[in-house]
Image: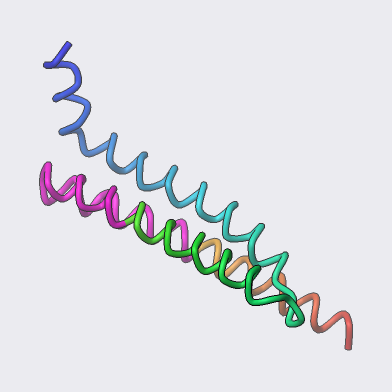
């Protein structure tokens, strides 16, 4: 059993998939929190949003640390897939916001 866990843990594909899954989950969570931000919200709501962001950053750092600890290429695979998915989502989301603003004008 330990050999199977070590094989999976040291696999570059595993870390690439982990980075992709992490990015997708964080995209969904971030989208939900951004949609609920209102300029007239109380400080308590904004503090909760900031805490959620800090947790996302902390989890990302922990996963990337574990990936880089196993091997440089595993860490790079995790990081690159994570960043690519996050950037793609950001461009899609910003394009959507731009279209919505243009429609309102």
Q: Nearer the viewer, residue 10 or 39?
A: 39
Q: Quadrant of the C terminus?
A: bottom right
Residue at the image position 45 percent from the left and 52 percent from the top: 23
The image position of residue 94, as x and y in percent, is: 63, 74
The image position of residue 3, as x and y in percent, is: 12, 16
Residue at the image position 25 percent from the left and 52 percent from the top: 64
The image position of residue 7, as x and y in percent, is: 16, 24
Quadrant in the picture for residue 39: bottom right
Q: Quadrant of the N terminus?
A: top left
In the drawing, does residue 71 fall left or right of residue 28? left
Q: Nearer the viewer, residue 2 or 45?
A: 45
Residue 24 covered by magenta stretch: no
Name the image colouring. Answer: rainbow
The boundaries of the magenta stretch are 61-87
Q: Residue furthest right?
A: 104
The image position of residue 12, as x and y in percent, is: 22, 39
Please tell me whether residue 3 is drawn above or below residue 98 in the rendered image.
above
Residue at the image position 57 percent from the left and 60 percent from the top: 30
In the drawing, does residue 54 fall left or right of residue 92? left
Main secondary structure along the magenta-highlighted residues: helix
């Amino acid at each position: 059993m330990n050999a199977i866990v070590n094989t999976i843990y040291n696999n570059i594909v595993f870390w690439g998939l982990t980075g992709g899954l992490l990015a997708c989950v964080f995209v969904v969570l971030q989208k939900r929190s951004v949609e609920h931000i209102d300029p007239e919200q109380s400080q308590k709501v904004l503090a909760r949003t900031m805490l959620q962001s800090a947790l996302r950053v902390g989890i990302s750092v922990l996963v990337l640390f574990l990936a880089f600890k196993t091997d440089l290429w595993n860490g790079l695979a995790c990081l690159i897939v994570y960043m690519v998915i996050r950037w793609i989502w950001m461009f899609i989301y910003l394009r959507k916001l731009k279209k919505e603003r243009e429609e309102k004008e």
